[in-house]
Amino acid sequence: MYNSKAYSAASATSPLAHTTIARRDPTEHDVQIEILFCGICHSDLHTVRDEWHSMMPTAYPCVPGHEIVGRVTRVGSAVARFKPGDLASVGCLVDSDRTCPECQAGLEQFCPNMTLTYSFPDKHLGGVTYGGYSDSIVVDEHFVLRVPANLDLAGAAPLLCAGVTTYSPMRHWGVTKGKKVGVVGLGGLGHMGVKFAHALGAHVVVFTTSPSKKDDALRLGADEVVVSRNADEMQKHAGSFDFILDAVSADHDINAYIQLLRRDGNLTLVGAPEKPLAVSSFGLLFARRSLSGSLIGGIAETQEMLDFCGAHNITADVEVIPIQKVNEAYERLLKSDVKYRFSIDMASLKSE
Ligand code: NAP
Ligand code: ZN
């Protein structure tokens, strides 16, 4: 075991503060990574504040962070794919059983025995797993991803969650040229959704509650922007979408979007608001529309997404912050005031 610097929350109402945590020494299949950048996902905020208590209660102290990019510092004797000095990245998963049907299908995110990167039972050290708001992490090589060399590292970190969470359902639901695709909520996930839908050739419409984000949405790849609080603007798109990705972090009316789908259209929720959403069955019955959810992506698909980003030069638009600004960043996240992902420069942890 060795000590690592980190930021943790002691309870649902405590701010994140500097701490020291224990990390395991790499075992034969492990990769030790010096963390260079870690994105701030809204799931970090939901977890730190225990907003998902009824589904996944948070274990404290909580060290969040699952959008990790860094450099390999040490590898175990059986590690073949990484060597010290390589760039490496880690997303929301650090382990799974690798034998169940989900793992065999490359869908480790649905493995009943998966281990999430933070606030999950730690099989090695006991206690819970600690995430990327830290200067280093040790992860089994199966869950370590390669970072294309041409990508900016601060902007690549958010690909590990916001990227794959939006890429995966778009691939699953066949987003391609000729499809009309909506993205609801222009935050960290939403802005990646716009970039992917555009790169896949779809006609992209952004729905936002923030009129000030209109120009950015067009720059990011949207063909049209609708301010969702304007009912007339919404109505113009009734019955016309093949697919809508809903990436909203708070309570909102999803029926307003379901009625924008065409026959057999699908709305996929990736946002995970604290409270259940109300769904009118009528919107689904008429036109045989469907409503589904999607959780991050499997390991192979995460690598596929990173390679796609390398080929298309796609990264997140980030505001790089020192870790000392993390609590302020959370408050800004709640006000939809981020363009469009905070990425923590972990060099700032050295001064703690
Ligand atoms: P974020 O950066 O805070 O973006 C959320 C966006 O939702 C905001 O920018 C805002 O966009 C919109 N919004 C916020 N409050 C709203 C309200 N009251 N009504 C309508 N729209 C509102 O968050 P994120 O990191 O992208 O995460 C989004 C959600 O996805 C979170 O719930 C997160 O936990 C979840 N998530 C799920 C997965 C998964 O695997 N399924 C993975 C990662 C995150 P506008 O300003 O454009 O309206
Ligand atoms: Zn996330």
Image: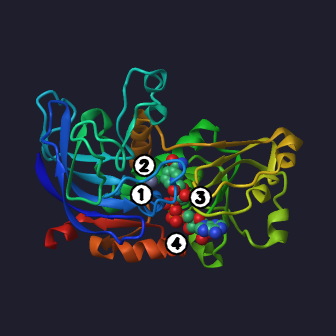
Quadrant of the rendered image containing residue 290: top right
In this rendering, is residue 192 above or below 28? below
Left or right, residue 203 beside residue 97: right
Asked whether 75 or 249 is in front, the reply is: 249
- Label 2 Cα crowd, 10 Å radius (few <14 / some 14-19 / many 20+): many
Q: Residue visible at 48% across and 67% down?
A: 340
Binning the other alpha carbons within 10 Å of mark 4 as few (below 14), some (14 to 19) or many (20 upward) gives: few
Q: Give the Cα distance between marks 2 and 4.
A: 28 Å
Q: CA distance from mark 1 to mark 3?
A: 25 Å
User: In the image, is the residue at mark 4 within 8 Å of ligand 1 by its beta carbon?
Assistant: yes
Which of the marked residues, 3 or 2, is nearer the chain's N terminus? 3
Disc 3 residue: CB within 8 Å of ligand 1: yes
- Residue 77: which quarter of the image? top left
Residue 57 against residue 337 in the figure, above or below: above
Mark 2 and mark 1 residues within 8 Å of each other at the beta carbon: yes
- Name the quadrant of the C terminus: bottom left
Q: Position of residue 319 (x, y in %)?
A: 39, 71
Give the residue at mark 2: 309
Residue denoted by label 1: 315
x and y percentages locating residue 52 in the rendered image: 52, 55
Q: Distance from label 3 to label 2 (Cα)?
A: 28 Å
Q: Nearer the viewer, mark 1 or mark 3?
A: 3
Residue at the disc numbered 4: 334
Residue 273 is marked as 3
1 or 4: tag closer to the N-terminus: 1
Which sits earlier in the primary sequence, circle 1 or circle 3? Answer: 3
